[in-house]
Image (tube, grey):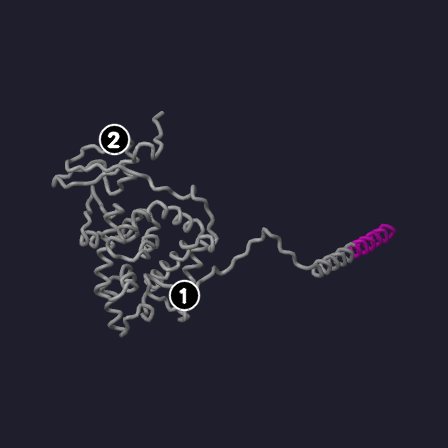
Amino acid sequence: MLERKTTFTLIAILIVLFGAIGFTYFYLSAKINAAIHQQPIIITENERRIYTPPIPDELDFCGEKVPMEDFDVRERIEREFLVNTYWHSASLLYLKRANRWFPIIEPILKKNGIPDDFKYMAVAESGLINSVSPDGASGFWQFMESAAKRYGLEVSGVVDERYNVEKSTQAACDYLKEAKAKLGNWTLAGASYNYGVTGITKQMQRQNSRNYYNLYLNDETYRFVARIVALKEIFKDPKKYGFYFIEEELYPRIETSEIKVNYPIKDLMKFAAQNEINYKLLKIFNPWLRDNFLPNKAKKTYTIKIPKPGEIKIVEEQ
């Protein structure tokens, strides 16, 4: 009986003890919580905030007005500003590469009477690298093989001039001039680079409209012109969109010498060594050479670029 009373006493003491602890805990929690909520919220300088980037009310593409008063057009433009502003790594790389490649592209556009805005189309198409799309479009200007051949580019297993920046830019100019003549303005010509001249023409006839911004098209073509417009604005004032860099951080243009060859080259590695560079550098500066030899049975004249002495440092063999 004594043992039972002792047990009940211990249980009672434990109940009281835990009750006191629980009450104290909840009381103090309530006080602390109340105190916290009575304090003003302090935002530190290092806190990250995400804002909608500034979007001008007036925009143009190749001097042709973008109707920002149209809610659909504005939202499409805004989407591309958001994507290209906050996809930091990609956009920063575009800005770095442009310093190297725009000085090559711009004079070709100018010589052909193509608006300078189209240099941003190369950014939108490939990010200024010799990329290959899932359907086989290749190079800075993303030509399919059939279109490349139509506009004078050689495409084979050993030579693919879609990877030659100068020649593919000229081919893009030829396409754009032809599209502008058929469609009537540069905006439609730009859209046709993604959708095709035939596709744009059919949609204009079907929808009884010659205004790109009034056409109902697929999402990819909708985004295409909008992305070029957004990239143009970001490139015009990078700091406005959060991109800060110093001149030395941009990729420099590397001066090259040109070697004209109208004969077969059996071994491009030996050719590189004869010109005091390695095979890797030969391929970097001439990505249109698609194999390790150049048969050239037709004795066509090709221009091979070699970096000038002092332009780059060549790593010596161990």
Badge count: 2
Q: Earlier in the sequence, mark 1 or mark 2?
A: 1
Asked if residue 34 lies left or right of residue 91, the reply is right
At horizontal 35% and vertical 30% (from top left) the residue drawn is 315
Vertical order, 289 against 185 (above or below)? above
Measuring from the top left, give residue 52's x and y in whole percent.
Answer: 49, 61
Q: Nearer the viewer, residue 261 or 216?
A: 261
Give the image quarter of residue 36: bottom right
Q: How far apart are marks 1 and 2 (CA)?
A: 52 Å
Vertical order, 121 against 70 (above or below)? above
Which residue in the protein does label 2 denote?
275
Measuring from the top left, give residue 128's x and y in whole percent.
Answer: 33, 49
Going by the numbered disc 2, the residue's amino acid type is Asn
In this rendering, does residue 136 appear at all? no
Give the image quarter of residue 61: bottom left
Q: Which of 177 and 77 is in front in this view?
A: 177
| Neighbour tally class for label 1: few under 14, some 14-19, many 20 plus, Cα within 10 Å | few
Q: Nearer the viewer, residue 179 or 99?
A: 99
User: Is 159 contained in the magenta span?
Assistant: no
Residue closest to the far top: 318
Measuring from the top left, give residue 55's x and y in whole percent.
Answer: 45, 62
Give the image quarter of residue 318: top left
Which residue in the protein does label 1 denote?
58
- Looking at the rendering, the stretch of residues picked out in magenta corresponds to 1-20
Vertical order, 304 against 138 (above or below)? above
Q: Main secondary structure of the magenta part?
A: helix
Q: What element carries label 2?
A: loop
User: Is 16 contained in the magenta span?
Assistant: yes
